[in-house]
Each structure stands twice: as structure tokens, then as C-alpha cells.
Image (tube, grey):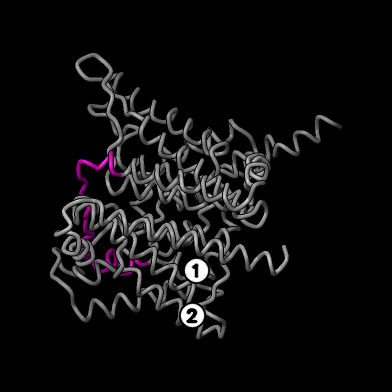
Amino acid sequence: MSNVNEEKNSKQILLILTAFSAAFIVAALCAGNIKDLIPGFLRINLSPSQFTRDYFKLGGLGGAFLNTGVIGLTVCGLLKITKAKCNGLTVAAYWLNVGFGTFGMTFLTMWPFIIGGFVYSLIKKVKYGTVVNFALFSTALAPFAGDLYFRYPMAEARGFSVWGLLGALVLGIVAACVMPAICGQSANFHKGYDLYNAGPAAGMLAFVVLCLLYKSTGIAIPSNTDLGSGEKSFVNIFFLIVFGACFFTAAMTDKDCFANYKKLWKSDGYKTDYTSAFGVPATLINMGLYGLFILAYYNVVHGFTMADGALAFTPAKFTGATMGAIMCMFAFVAQGAQPRTVFPIMIGYFLASLIPFGAFALGIVEAQAWTLTTQAMLVGLCFASGLAPVTGKFGFIPGVIAGAIHALLVMNVPALHGGFCLYNGGFTCGIVAFVLVPVLESFIGTKEERAEKKKA
């Protein structure tokens, strides 16, 4: 791609991301109870927020949307000031930061890592704009910063402290400085089949920090998971408007966007930047279609169990964590994820859910461990979508297998990082890819390799 096209794409991407951020601010103003908007925002930002905490419950619907919008504008401002070249990876960094704005990260907890990225750029003597994505990915450890700010090492939150601020700054600087190096090796771990490349890197780093701050000292690991009843109607209306706007904008800017999207649809998504390969308008189509696809899943999916000898079904709650999951699932909409390659992973989740259901229905256990609408599984699926290249390269059935394995692992991986790594599901994707991909390569090969064998 020419430098002119790269520059044009970069400007379009930044404009689109800024528009998304503005949409969150507008939604915050429309969410009702305007008097609690700022107090709710402050409650979110002045509380420890270990993964996953429902900001809809903690700060109200308006406060949660405001936190998300402010985080989004901060990211866009940072991209603008540092003159970063925006691409598919930038889209991922944006949505991961914004996505956790409703259940794990705050405007305050992201700053130690942004500052850390600046320190890294000084040490390496490079422009901040060239490493800004890594700084934004290092915010995966934001819950540590929140705990240092307001709780650590006490058992209960004690309020803001200067020592806590200094500790968070040290953490942010170290994380932002080592993340680029670890991410560089992360691809060797999963061979490019985990779209959330920073997931394994963040997970490993969080494990080290957990051991240093908590395990080695004997300080109790807090638990801040607190879920509300959800806000289904508002979240659905918001996303329907936003995703609809993606289609409208794409159609208005490029008459060939749908033709280009047909090419995108056939792509395997393996190490592919959709903005460069198919253009920003076609990527916007993917944003709209993929967004509606995800939203439909969360509206349709039901957990199932046995109650009084009959099947009982439970719908998904649209909590802050659920909304965040939708946005995090949106992260790689410009770099490898689309409905065709993610659908098999959803099937894998469904098949895996039959295991705890069967164990309970047969009387092997007294209570069903989880259902498809257990909050951890709703969040887990968003990151399981990071295995989309497995479907793209190996086919439908391998995608189903990858999804099923991810479902069986994702609730157990937090034990490694204490719930302090926001990219828990991406970390799990790395483990699945590390185990599964070599087996697939050895026994069945990629779709292209199988096609070549048929020709021979």
C-alpha cells in the first residue's frame, strides 16, 4: 500500500474511533439520572476494580458510559498528539481499552501505563507514536493500578494514597517497558493463531506481578466481582444505532465497499489487516455486520439446567461486563475476526456447556458448574473469538474444537493472575493455540495443504 493510502486510512480510522468515543459521551447524557452522572463517574474511578466489576451497578449507566467515552477520547487524543499511524492493530488497542471501561478499567488506572509508554520511548529513543499501541495494550494490568491506588496492602479499600500512586506509576512504567519485548515473543508461543497477541504476554506478566505483590508477601488477593441486573434495552438501542451507522458511513464513502467486503469475507483472517487489505469502508461493513452478529448472540443465547425435573433456561444479563465483552469482541474486527470464522467457536462453547450440564443432570455433581450465560462464560466468549484464524486456516470443525477447549479453560486461568489481568480470555487463547495448533498441523494440515494433497 502506498504512503498516501496509508495516511488516508490512518486519518479515517482516527476519525471513526473519535466518533465512537463521542457516541459514548452522548449515550451517557441520554442514560437518565443526569444528576448522578459525575458522582457515578467518580465512584467508578475512586474504587478498586478487579476483573470483573460491573460499572453499571457501581456508577450507574451514565457513569459507566461516561468512563468509557472519556477513555476513548483519551486514546484518540493520544493517537493524535503522538502522530501515530492508525491501522488494524490500533483499532484493537482502542476497543480493548474502551471495552474494559464498563467492567475493569478506569480513566485513572490507564494513566500509569500511558506514562510508562512515554518512558519506554525515551529509553529506546523512538517516537512515542511508534510504540503507542504497546502502551495501550499494557493497560491489561490496570486492575493492579486500581488496587495500589486505593487498597493495597490493606484488606479493605482505604482511599487514595501517595504511596499507592507511586507504586502504580512504577508498575505502569515497568509494564509498558517490558510489554513490547514480551509481545514480540508471544507470537512464537501461539504461532499467530491468537488475535489477542498481547493476551499471553499480559497474562504471564500479571502472574509475575501477582507473585511479587501478593503471593510472596502473603497479602490477601481481593475479590471485587459485583454484578447488577443489567440494562438490556439501553445497550441494545445504543449498539443498533452505532452498528447501523457503520453501514451508512461505509456506503456513503465508497460505492465498492460491499464488493470489497465479499473479498474480506473469504479471507482466512490469519495475520491480516483488513484496513490495508480491503480498505477502511469494507472494514466498516465488517464492524457493522460483526457487531450485529455479536449483539444477536447475546440476545439469543440462554443457559440451560435442570430444575424440578424440567429444563430451565436463563437469558444473558446485559451488565457492564456483558457490554464490555461485546466491545472487546469487537477489538479485532479490523484484523482477523468476522462472523464466518467466529461462528464455529460459538458452537464449540455450546458443545462444551453440555459437559457441566450432563454432570449435574446425571447426579455426578450437586450443582451445575456453569452455563452459557454465566458471566465468566459471556466474557470468555468475547476473547475466544481471538481464535478465529484457527477456523480460517484449518476449517469449521477445528474452529469448533478450539472454542470448546477455550470454554473449558477460561474460568480456571484467573487462578494464575488473581483476576488482575483484563486479557484473561486472550491469555487462554494463547494456551489453546499452543496446545491445539501443532496437533492440527501434524494430523490434518491447513485447508490449503489439504487441497494440494487432493490435487496430487
Residue 268, by quadrant, is top right
Along the line of sight, which residue is nearer the eye, 166 or 411?
A: 166
Give the residue drawn at x 33%, y 25%.
Answer: 357
Residue plotted at (60% across, 38% down): 391
The image quadrant that residue 59 belongs to is bottom left
Residue indicated by mark 1: 134
In the displayed image of the protein, which residue is found farthest to the right? 456
The N terminus: image quadrant: bottom right
Q: What residue type is labelled 2?
A: Tyr
- Percent coordinates x, y for residue 393 in the rendering: 65, 41
From the viewer's side, name the closer residue of 158 and 28.
28
Q: Estimate the x, y position of residue 134 in percent, counting from the top left.
A: 50, 68
Report the side of 113 relative to 246 (left or right). left
- Asked if marks 1 and 2 touch (Cβ < 8 Å), the reply is yes
- Tell me which label, 1 or 2, sits earlier in the chain: 2
Residues in magenta, as a range: 209-234
Counting from the top left corner in percent of width and height, residue 261 is at 63, 43
Mark 2 Cα within 10 Å, few/some/many (few <14, many 20+)?
Answer: many
> Can the viewer see residue 202 in this picture?
yes
Quadrant of residue 207 in the image?
bottom left
Residue located farthest toward the top when viewing the structure as drawn:
309
Q: Is the magenta stretch mostly helix, strand or loop?
A: loop
Residue 120's disc is 2
Tell whether 97 sits left or right of 259: left
